[in-house]
Image: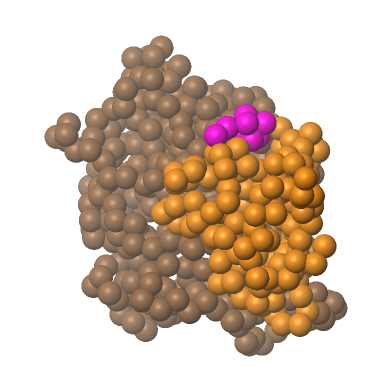
Chain colours: A orange, B brown
Amino acid sequence: MQRRRQTAVQLTSSPEQTRSLGRQLALRLQPGDLLSLRGHLGAGKTTLIQGIAAGLGVTDLVSSPSFTLIHQHPGRIPLYHIDLYRLSAADVGAIGLDEIVDSEAVVAVEWAEKLPADLLRNALDIEIVFDESDEDARRIHLRARGPRSARLLSSLTENCDADTRP
Amino acid sequence: MLLLGIETSCDETSAAIVSGPSDDGVQLLSNVVASQDDLHAHFGGIVPEVASRRHIEMILPVIREAMQRASVTWEDLQGIAVTNGPGLVGSLVVGVAAAKAIAQARRLPLVGIHHLEAHIYAAAIHGPLPFPLLALIASGGHSHLVLMHGHGKYDVLGRTLDDAPGEAFDKGARLLGLPYPGGPHLAALADSFPGRVEPMPRAHISNSRDFSFSGVKAALARAVRTTQPQERDRARLAAAYQESIALSLTERTLQVADEIGDSPIFVAGGVARNQRLRDLLAQRAAAAGLRVHFPDPALCTDNAAMVAAAGVHKLARAGPDPPDLDCFANIQLRSWDATTAS
């Protein structure tokens, strides 16, 4: 049996390319998929999720939920866009995340390092880091936590011509 | 009519008593706000569970205090207005449950108010609203340009494509190592910088009425990362950052005001307290021959006075909501159904 890919790195050189990667990813998403995003302020987490939303057929404006915490968008597959920026790690349970993660939607969580590990069992981790080669360049590290996200990652990297060093 | 307003959509527990509407707008009799800023500063941000619990503890004392200050008894009340979205559900539900219980017990008409319309109606406390008007609502969670043709008649013309301006202030403050809540701290640091400053780059979105603040946030993040600024540089960065946000809000608002005719501009929301935004917008609007109004700073951040002000108008024009009024984390601003309008 073919070994599933566990990690990949994609390079983007502009917010548009980051959104485009999001659209590519979204075409492979299934209801129930969980994307856990990390990255410093201004790295492009919301930008990537804008692309994911577009790929899921969301027509709403996708803006940052840092203050409002949860945005729910109808689409081909519904999207929950969650942002834990203002929350302390101890209290993320209080916004009912466990129920949302079990729903038939795609769930994308910003500042996911605050999520308890048991919620992340099957998540695809996405970490966006600044690439100092250019002010708009980003390295996007993808890591599959379980077989489900490994399948997703394999499908993405098979069809993307970006850098996929492990 | 004498109306009780209740607000618990986010960090503030607030109750207010107003009378009206009359030709002079809405008369404010009391406005009590219990802020959770100190509590959340301890955690460095909001904690929904803690916020919800604090609302439960505070809601009845705050309502009682508002009634006492206004010298109003339960028998005097003629209606209740409550924010029922958008916001944190665990917080919203406390105010909505209190409002429903009082409405049931006292057989009073109850009306749910959208958080954004509440912000706009803060201006109705100073006098009657002149329609049509252009409202700029700039806060932690929102950045909206709303054309209002009349009471309860809204057209959302522009929104933020990414971050809200208050959020941009808060995140900028965090990047500069300033404490929570970041907005006022960043403004103070910015204002300490002597002389003029070159604003950080602003988003130029052509053929649009929308805002964008993620670019300037990324620019500040980059500046902090690459230069590791010392005290004076941090003040300069804060000033350049604030200038960029204030200019973006000002330029877009005046552009839209110009496109729709010479409607007066009403600024609302927590960011309306920012002095640089006030100065810049007032100055540029005057130069363009446009009128601009800012609410009393105390009515810019979340409060029940603005909810009550919207409530008296909505009850008079759209009638009460059913007694099983629900609350919503995400809900769009909609015009009132004027089916029961008098």
Q: Residue furthest left?
A: B342
Residue B242 position within the rendered picture, expressed as x and y whole percent measured from the top left: 61, 73
Task: In this rendered view, identify the residue nearer to me: A89 or B288.
Answer: A89
Q: Is residue B121 left or right of residue B228?
A: left
Task: In this rendered view, identify the residue nearer to me: B254 or B333.
Answer: B333
Q: Is residue A56 visible?
A: yes
Q: What residue appears at the point 55 percent right and 78 percent down from the top-left corner?
A: B202
Q: Quadrant of residue A115?
A: top right
Q: What residue appears at the point 46 percent right and 35 percent down from the top-left corner?
A: B328
Q: Residue furthest top?
A: B105
Q: How many marks?
A: 0
Q: Is residue B30 visible?
A: no
Q: Any magenta on residue A15?
A: no
Q: Which quadrant would the C terminus of chain A be assigned to in this image?
A: bottom right
Q: What residue appears at the point 28 percent right and 38 percent down from the top-left corner?
A: B314
Task: In this rendered view, identify the residue nearer to me: B298 or A61.
Answer: A61
Q: Is residue B206 left or right of residue B47?
A: left
Residue B158 position within the rendered picture, expressed as x and y whole percent measured from the top left: 39, 63
Residue A155 position within the rendered picture, expressed as x and y whole percent measured from the top left: 65, 54
Q: Any magenta on residue A99?
A: yes
Does residue B166 lie above or below A99 as drawn?
below
Does residue B313 lie above or below A138 as drawn?
above
Q: Which quadrant would the N terminus of chain A be assigned to in this image?
A: top right
Does residue B81 lie above or below A68 as drawn?
above
Q: What residue appears at the point 35 percent right and 30 percent down from the top-left corner?
A: B111
Magenta span of residues? A97-104
Magenta segment main secondary structure: helix
Q: Is residue A17 left or right of residue B112?
A: right
Residue B338 position within the rendered picture, expressed as x and y whole percent measured from the top left: 19, 38
